[in-house]
Amino acid sequence: QVQLVESGGGLVQAGGSLRLSCAVSGTIFGGDVMGWYRQAPGKQRDLVASITTGGSTNYGDPVKGRFTISRDNAKNTVYLQMNSLKPEDTGVYSCSLTRRTFTNEYRYWGQGTQVTVSS
């Protein structure tokens, strides 16, 4: 069973920085993809960034050049460094682990952490 626990959210002024962490308990397999999603009030949940076990990354257009996703495989932890934050970055940030088998795709979620950026 995989469990994800996020930490590091909070209130920050526009232009500031935050680092989110996601600690994963359970086994991470080589094909697993870790990701960060965010959901603003009244909006759908969107992908912020993802990273493979090999370190390949992907970013949503709104955060390119400002956010960096990384992982420490030895610690089973994924990070999201958020710089130059904007009010529109406000939302609940959730960590995910996506696991694909030959026939199915499973996605595990953390409980989410609130990020609020004030103008």
Image (cartoon, helix red, strand yellow):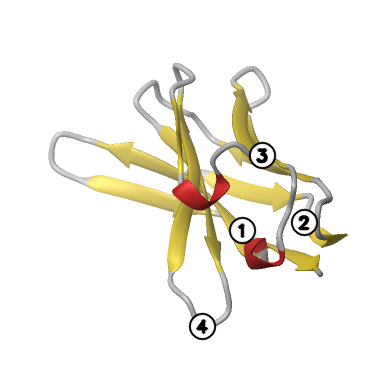
Q: Count numbered badges in the picture.
A: 4
The kind of residue on which mark 2 rests is Gly
**Mark pair 3, 2: CA separation:** 14 Å
Look at discs 3 and 1 and give the one toward the viewer. 1
Residue 59 position in % (x across, y down): 47, 40
Residue 74 in sight in this render:
yes
Dot 2 alpha-carbon crowd within 10 angstroms: few under 14, some 14 to 19, many 20 or more: some
State yes or no: discs 2 and 1 in contact (Cβ < 8 Å).
yes
Q: Furthest-bottom residue in view?
A: 42
Say which label, 4 or 2, has the lower sequence index.
2
Q: In the image, which is nearer the foreground, mark 3 or mark 4?
A: 4
Residue holding disc 4? 42
Find residue 49 and report its horizontal and vertical position in percent.
50, 42
Dot 3 or dot 1: first in sequence order is: 3
Residue at position x 49%, y 20% from top? 55
Which residue is the site of mark 2? Answer: 9
Badge 1 is on which residue? 93
Q: Where does label 3 land, which residue?
A: 23
Estimate the spatial distance between the alpha carbons at disc 3 and disc 4, rounded to whole Å: 28 Å
Q: SS of the residue at dot 2? A: loop
How many neighbours does mark 4 have within 10 angstroms: few (below 14), some (14-19), or many (20 or more)?
few
CA gap, disc 1 and disc 4 = 14 Å
Give the alpha-carbon distance from disc 4 to disc 2, as whole Å: 20 Å
Q: Of the residues under marks 3 and 4, which one precedes in the sequence?
A: 3
Element class at badge 4: loop
Q: What residue type is labelled 3?
A: Ala
Q: Tell me which amino acid carries mark 1.
A: Tyr
Q: Which of marks 2 and 1 is nearer the N terminus?
A: 2
Q: How far across and down, in percent of the image, does residue 6 sit?
A: 68, 50
